[in-house]
Amino acid sequence: MAPVTSLTDLVHQRLANALSATLPEADADPLLRRSDRADFQANGILALAKKAKANPRELATQVVSHITTGDVIKDIEVSGPGFLNITITDKAITENLAARYADDTARLGVPLAAHPGTTVIDYAQPNVAKEMHVGHLRSAVIGDALVQLLEFTGESVVRRHHIGDWGTQFGMLIQHLDEHPGELDHGGAEISGEEAMSNLDRLYKAARKLFDSDEEFKTRARRRVVDLQAGDPQTLAAWQKFVDESKIYFFSVFEKLDMEIRDPDIVGESGYNDMLDETCRLLEESGVAEISDGALCVFFDDIKGPDGNRVPLIVRKSDGGYGYAATDLSAIRDRVFHLKATSLLYVVDVRQSLHFKMVFETARRAGWLNDDVTAYQLAFGTILGKDGKPFKTREGVSVKLEDLLDEAVQRATAVVREKAEKVGLSEQEIVENGRYVGIGAVKYADLSTSAVRDYKFDLDQMVSLSGDTSVYLQYAYARIQSILRKAGEARPLAHPELELAPAERALGLHLDQFSEVVAEAATEYAPHKLTAYLYQLASTLTTFYDQCPVLKAETPEQQENRLLLVDLTARTLHRGMDLLGIRTPEKL
């Protein structure tokens, strides 16, 4: 089915034609916004009048004279110094809703982007041999939502999980495993992610203790780092075992988060080892990087330390080792020239902003990034506890992500169980819905906050049935499903001839904005704009329920019209929540 032209676009077209007829030389594209006085308000007349040296109110009056009302625009009036207040016809609203409802592709009439490209999203970056903690949550949740949003708009998306799987700690771990070969032996039995990470934790603690107390072991461990970097087969095999054990754990955590993480998309630091020498050579030969005190560095005039000296990006250390910069720059080369990306998106902690600023500028100087290929860091803030401080346990350590998710599901299951008897949920449905509500609550709390801002992690508020929570939206969806089940033989059907009540109009006009919001959220990498839209949709639905009976409507036609309205609302909630990675239970 063809995309549905939004009411906003229809009004834009009418106004643009009218302005062209009034000012043929003008760039006649007025800015529309929602207004308290009317469905839309055109506020671009003032700027055009100033440019044409015309009286804005007179110009507005001339524009109105070129607009035919009756089909889409019910009424248009000049207000103030030259604003245009525009009211849409009931018929246009209902026909627009019917067209969206008829779209059986589950796109709800949302068009694809006019010029989609290829975006590589770098997100969900845990570290091998380390447990995931609360600090890993935001990158995973925000990144996953952006993958869904961009793919929905037609963008070709390549997922990349740049896991920490290289570095000096692996020499210590590999040497200890070589000297204690039974440490990770689980008898060939299949183990869960938690058990796999428990084994690694035990190994890491034992290796660290020996590393700190035994100079001879420390020497052997450091020699292993050299062997690893040189590609020694035995050392690489041991390293691969660490990676495989860690992946078992990673996949178990992401499964709890209800996220799809595919093994081919996991390309860690080690994945770019073969490119590091060439990356350094290209930077040095082009003059982008220079040798300083034995290290290969890139300098920036606007980045200086407290002493006033320029702070360099160190690509290769003085001892010949490579740092994060070399790996990140090699990753850019791979993503631009091999994956053919037009956009690189990094969902990474704000504390790494300076690093990425220098890396991106270096890549631009080298010609790897340009007007056709852009890179952007979506720098996210910190998760705080109720006290407004970084979220920690009472002992002052980072909260384990699995523990946090388990607690969220437990709290949510208790909330679901309270209403289970009333809505007829089985024990299996209680458990399943508890998982959907708990994980959805955690994701929504993160996504409903602008990524750059910190937010407080409060499970009590997150699983509340009232307020701006995912549970509120899930409950709104389930409530509609209950109405549809009770409707009997009555079916959703559009009746454009019917007059709409104010609450029906408000809900219909809000549904029409879905296309615009999705496009904006995807273009601006701002999933919080979609959550805000969905919360307002659920709130508008609540007002509609209070004022417009559905099953007890005055006529069969009105009932059918309202059934279509609520069913389309349910479909929009379902699609919107799905783009955020949140489930919508049928009963709640």
Image: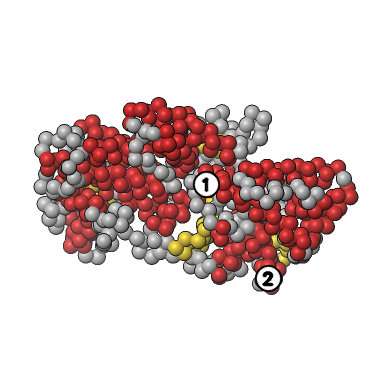
Pinpoint residue 468: horizontal percent, then vertical percent. 40, 35
Please tell me whether mark 1 sits on a helix, a strand or a loop.
helix
Q: Which residue is mark 2?
A: 278
Q: Residues within 10 Å of mark 1 (few under 14, many from 20)?
A: few
Q: Could you tell whether 316 is left or right of 451 in the image?
A: right
Q: Residues within 10 Å of mark 2 (few under 14, many from 20)?
A: few
For image coordinates 31% across by 59% down, the residue present is: 111
In which quadrant is the N terminus drawn? bottom left
Q: Nearer the viewer, mark 2 or mark 1?
A: 1
Q: Could you tell whether 108 is left or right of 367 in the image?
A: left
For image coordinates 17% across by 42% down, the residue present is: 489
Pinpoint residue 354: horizontal percent, then vertical percent. 61, 52
Check if mark 2's residue and mark 1's residue have beta carbons within 8 Å. no
Query: Looking at the image, which is closer to me, 98 or 83?
Result: 98
> Which quadrant of the structure image shows residue 24?
bottom left
In which quadrant is the C terminus drawn? top left
For image coordinates 84% across by 50% down, the residue present is: 218
Q: Which residue is mark 1?
A: 255
For image coordinates 53% across by 38% down, the residue present is: 405
> Which quadrant of the structure image shows residue 550?
top left
Pinpoint residue 481: horizontal percent, then vertical percent. 29, 40
Query: Looking at the image, which is closer to me, 500 or 246?
Result: 246
Amino acid, disc 2: Glu
Residue 385 in view here = yes
